[in-house]
Image: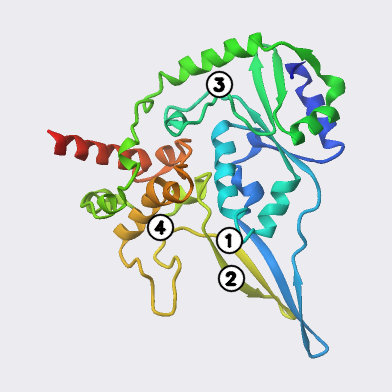
Amino acid sequence: MMYKIAKEKLDTLLQLMAKSQEVYLAAQMDRPAKHVFFPQSETLYTVRKVDGKMEIAPEELLDQDFVLFGVKACDVRGIEILDKVYLSEPVDSYYAARRSHATIVAWACYAPVETCFCQVFGIDPANPGGDVSIWEVEQELFWQPLTAKGEALTEVVGELLEVSDEECVHAQKVKIGEMMKRLPYRDLRIEGWHGGVLHEKFDSELWEELHQACLACGTCTYLCPTCQCYDIKDYTAGCKVSRYRCWDSCMYSDFTMMSHGNNRTRQMQRFRQRFMHKLVYFPNNHDGVHSCVGCGVCVSKCPSGLNIVKVIKAFEQRGSESNE
């Protein structure tokens, strides 16, 4: 069912939610929404020596409900991709606890940046998904619960909502669709990355050309909504030792370092790993779902102008030259 509320009542809506649970606003985040479920660093457990014996105390799991409010369709897909990683066996209990207590309120996208290409990966910014979807139409917000969690949150704020039809929302969806057709990367093609292309892509000499300007700074991985790699380390604080995990990047020379060294000894190999994982390895293992949501952040933030769009276009161009 569709509901509506005056836009001027948004603060009241948020305050009503906040009476019963934490509310995180996507507009106030300076990083991808994944950090709400997969923090940049977190303690896993602490070891203390008590009366000559070692005591291990796991970090307590989150047990309070919260709302993640205002994320776009690309971040919703990013969370769904993380679900495939952390909720499959063996389930990551820290991530699972946060996901189970979260209600995601997604906001239809009205101002995509020029570097956006989410539709290439089947994401519809006019239908953002989540547990509740919101559309902004002039001075009104339209609210539609999509899941049981969404229905529960609707009951919490029900006193502010009134039932509405979907006609205005339909017209707004059409406008968003027309807007997306004008973006520069709307015609980006990924067909050449489907099927049995692993060896063809892996062995391509293009990687030697493409990686040359890479600084291995890791900006792309830390800002990416779907990158999920982490490292585990220990730190001591006098009478205790805590084990924690923190984000890591496959672009770093010491990533997955073992006693004998690293099996990717060259930056080209690390550069290739990042894009092969997103475009080949991950979809091969997850029913064709790519580990990219087309948000365009890596396009706008890479200091060297290297990004997934450049990689896709380079391979497309090489394929076209081969067919001539």
Q: Are marks 4 and 1 in contact (CB under 8 Å)?
A: no
Asked if one can make out residue 16 in the rendered structure from this viewpoint, the answer is yes
On the image, the x and y values in percent for residue 318 come to 20, 40
User: Residue at 44% across / 71% down in the picture?
Assistant: 257
The one nearer the camera, 140 or 171, is: 171
The one nearer the camera, 120 or 185, is: 120
Q: Amino acid at mark 3?
A: Tyr
- Label 3 – label 4 distance at C-alpha: 33 Å
Rate crowding at label 2 as few (under 14), some (14 to 19) or many (20 or more) other CA atoms within 10 Å.
Answer: few
User: Residue at 64% across / 73% down in the picture?
Assistant: 235
34 shown above or below 93: above
**Which residue position is annotated with label 2?**
233
* Quadrant occupied by the C terminus: top left
Q: Amino acid at mark 4?
A: Met
Q: Point out the residue furthest to the left here.
A: 324
On the image, the x and y values in percent for residue 169 come to 63, 14
Q: Earlier in the sequence, mark 4 or mark 1?
A: 1
318 shown above or below 249: above
Q: Are marks 4 and 2 in contact (CB under 8 Å)?
A: no
**Which residue position is annotated with label 3?**
110
105 shown above or below 181: below
Identify the image quadrant of residue 250: bottom left
- Label 2 – label 1 distance at C-alpha: 8 Å
- Locate residue 92 relative to residue 191 in the image: left or right: right
Identify the image quadrant of residue 130: top right
- Label 1 – label 3 distance at C-alpha: 33 Å
**Which residue position is annotated with label 1?**
246
**Which residue position is annotated with label 4?**
251
On the image, the x and y values in percent for residue 305 come to 34, 42
Q: Which mark is residue 317?
A: none
Q: Are marks 2 and 1 in contact (CB under 8 Å)?
A: yes
Rate crowding at label 4 as few (under 14), some (14 to 19) or many (20 or more) other CA atoms within 10 Å.
Answer: many
